[in-house]
Amino acid sequence: MSRQEQGWRILVLSDQVREILYSSSLRSAFKEIDFVLSCGDLPFPYLEFVLTTLNVPLLYVPGNHDRTIHTSDGRTVSHPEGAVNIDRRIYTLKLPNRRPLTLVGLGGSMYYGGSTNQYTDWEMRKRMVGLEMRLTWNRWFRKRKVDLFVTHAPAFGIHDGADQCHRGFQSFLGFIRRQRPIYHVHGHMHPSYGYDTEPRQYHDTEVRNIYGYELLEISP
């Protein structure tokens, strides 16, 4: 198969540092990765290590535990250096010999105490309004649809929990039905707490709960 006929290979990360990714074996273990995607709540140095070792784009949304940090040498660090924050953005990734891939990102979790990156469902809906207007324009006039919907929190009723912190967003369900991405990838729901990590199908979209890492492929 020629390079022109190949799809995308994506390394998706979330919530837990994995030793194999934070080691010298990373490059040999994950060959031919087109880009890295983080669904949040991972240390900035970890993401920077993955980015520089694989030397491919790294896109991310913030999790509910991601914070600005103050280093011992007096620096203020608000994001992983070299990575692209796609929170509340429509981001089209273009690489040689690949069809363009369109991602939509929404970081944060359900509001449960008023800290950074927490939203009520109504607040999340408001964050999505402008995105959906632009996506409709893209679909009609550029013939471009959403390939990947990237969030930290889950959608309501899919991989989510009963407590306020881990409840999913109702607003995500409508977005998925209208935009029909190939994948919805999210983090936040740790299997060590008993949450389901099996892939789920919602209408035309496959939903993945990412914990640690997964490899995704999107066909040409």
Image: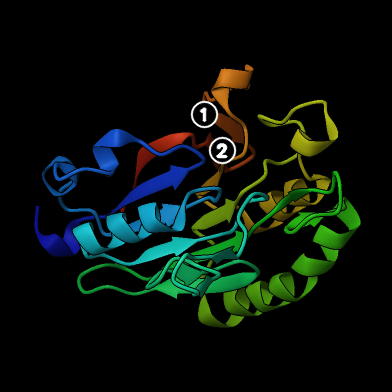
Query: In this rendering, does residue 159 appear at all?
Result: yes
Marking on residue 139: none
Disc with the residue nearer the chain's start (2 vs 1) = 1
Q: Residues within 10 Å of mark 2 (few under 14, many from 20)?
A: many
Residue 150, image x and y in percent? Answer: 56, 54
Disc 1, SS: loop
Residue nearest the viewer, comparing 108 with 174:
108
Inspect the image, locate mark 1, and give the three-letter code of the amino acid beneath it.
Pro
Count of numbered circles on the image: 2
Inspect the image, locate mark 2, and give the three-letter code of the amino acid beneath it.
Val
Q: Is residue 95 above or below residue 153?
A: below
Q: Residue at x 21, y 58 (%)?
A: 54
Q: Residues within 10 Å of mark 1 (few under 14, many from 20)?
A: some
Please give left or right for residue 156 compared with residue 147 in the image. Answer: right
Please give left or right for residue 8 compared with residue 144 in the image. Answer: left
Q: Are marks 2 and 1 in contact (CB under 8 Å)?
A: yes
Asked where in the image residue 115 lies, by quadrant, the reply is: bottom right
Marking on residue 207: 2
Asked where in the image residue 2 lies, by quadrant, the reply is: bottom left
